[in-house]
Amino acid sequence: MSLFYRKSHTFKYSLFGIAFGFCFPIFSFLFDGIFLKEMSFSVESFINVHYLNPLHFIIDSAPIFLGIAFGFAGRNLDEATEVRQDVETYNEELLQQNQIVTQYSHELQAQSDKIKEQRVQVEKLFSDIQASVRTAERLQLALLPDLSSLKDAFDEVFVFYKAKDIISGDFYWFRNIIVEGKEYKIIIVADCTGHGVPGAIMTIVGYFLLERIVEKEKIVNPKEILENLNEGITEAFSSSLSSDRSIKVREGMDASILVFNETDKEIIYGGANRPLYYRNFDNQTIQIIKGSRAALGGEKRKKEKVFVSHTLKYEKESEFYLFSDGYPDQFGGENDKKFGSKRFRQLLNQNLSNSMSQMHTEIKSTFDNWKYQTPQTDDVVVVGIKMK
């Protein structure tokens, strides 16, 4: 702050100090004039007095010292005033900031209350969805063949069934049916496109189509079952009653069908994009029959899909394995890779001397160990059958 700023205390106090300081030499001069009357008033006498009493030099310099001293006092007061003004300004700004913070706090509280309300709604919605999904799971499991019926039909059998998301896009189907006096045991493993809810819807479609094809229409040949399944799935999702013709459903399924003709003692297999793994008396290792390279359903193709049936020997000690791609496609292991079809065959070959119950235990534990903490990749179903 400038010394010549007239409103400042520095300027005022300096003037006051100088004015007050001039009082000392004036009083000193009057004192000398009164008590030293014998001396004539002149410059020479004035100088002589100062020589006689050096204190006069100090007295005469009082305006300077007092002016400086009072100036410093005024300066300190100015600085204090400036600091006080800064503090007041800061307090005002702080008050404004507090008001803003208070406003924001109210807004945040309102947002927090809204978020809590939405969270309650989301939790209720999630709970309702979970309840619905659990109900769907029970309904889906109720449609699957009872394991006791499979054990009554075959000498040894196991089913490893594990959904990725509670409800599954994989399913297995079994019927023991008599057609034209011949007894057939039909076991099917199907892998629908997707998993979760979309996959589960496809399993219901597939289940009831199989009911119609096998139970009502009495079709037992795997090739013909696949053809009818393909046609039924395609028609189910391309109805002329659809209100939106732009909707295109590409979903379909892969399937393995194994038919035991108990009367003629023959076994017939047909597959859509799925293989059959088997071993009979003549083989010491797992053999493979590849399925037809065509999926069931999906968009219509210009080229007709061709499905084939394969006839196998009906021999004791034969083993058959039907499975979806969920098992070999599972990621895990030390390098987080797919389990793979080759490793799956090795697993079966290493346990061929075991019972189906022991094979089930090995398949389940191997899957769990391989997956470990890796999320499940897809729905899984493996069915093993052994003839005695």
Image (spheres, rainbow, N blue to C red):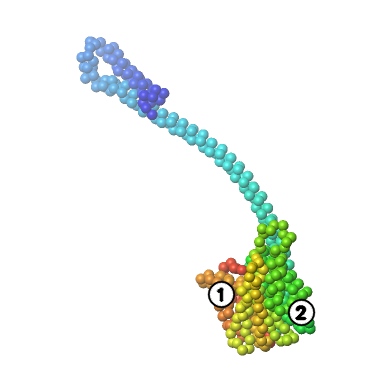
Question: Which of the 4 image quadrants contains residue 326?
Answer: bottom right
Residue 68: image location, x then y, percent: 33, 26
| Identity of the residue drawn at 53% across and 70% down | 336
Up-down: is 157 above or below 123?
below
Q: Mark 1 points at which residue?
A: 340
Left or right side of 294 for 22? left
Q: How crowded is mark 2: few (under 14 residues within 10 Å), some or many (20 or more)?
A: some
Between residue 196 and residue 37, name the one nearer to us.
196
Q: Dot 1 lies on which element?
A: loop
Question: Which of the 4 image quadrants contains residue 239?
Answer: bottom right
Residue 312: image location, x then y, percent: 66, 84
Q: In which quarter of the image is the C terminus?
A: bottom right
Q: How crowded is mark 1: few (under 14 residues within 10 Å), some or many (20 or more)?
A: some
Between residue 163 and residue 19, name the one nearer to us.
163
Q: Mark 2 against mark 1, which lies toward the viewer?
A: 2
Type of amino acid under label 2: Ile
| Identity of the residue drawn at 41% across and 31% down | 79
Type of amino acid under label 1: Gly
| Identity of the residue drawn at 68% across and 77% down | 223
Q: Which of marks 2 and 1 is nearer the N terminus?
A: 2
Residue 354 shows which numbered tag? none
Q: Name the residue under label 2.
A: 177
Question: How far apart, in angstroms, are the residues tagged by discs 2 and 1?
Answer: 35 Å
Residue 35: image location, x then y, percent: 27, 13
Residue 59: image location, x then y, percent: 29, 21
Q: Dot 2 lies on which element?
A: strand
Q: Can you see residue 258?
A: yes
Q: Quadrant of the N terminus?
A: top left
Left or right side of 362 for 134? right
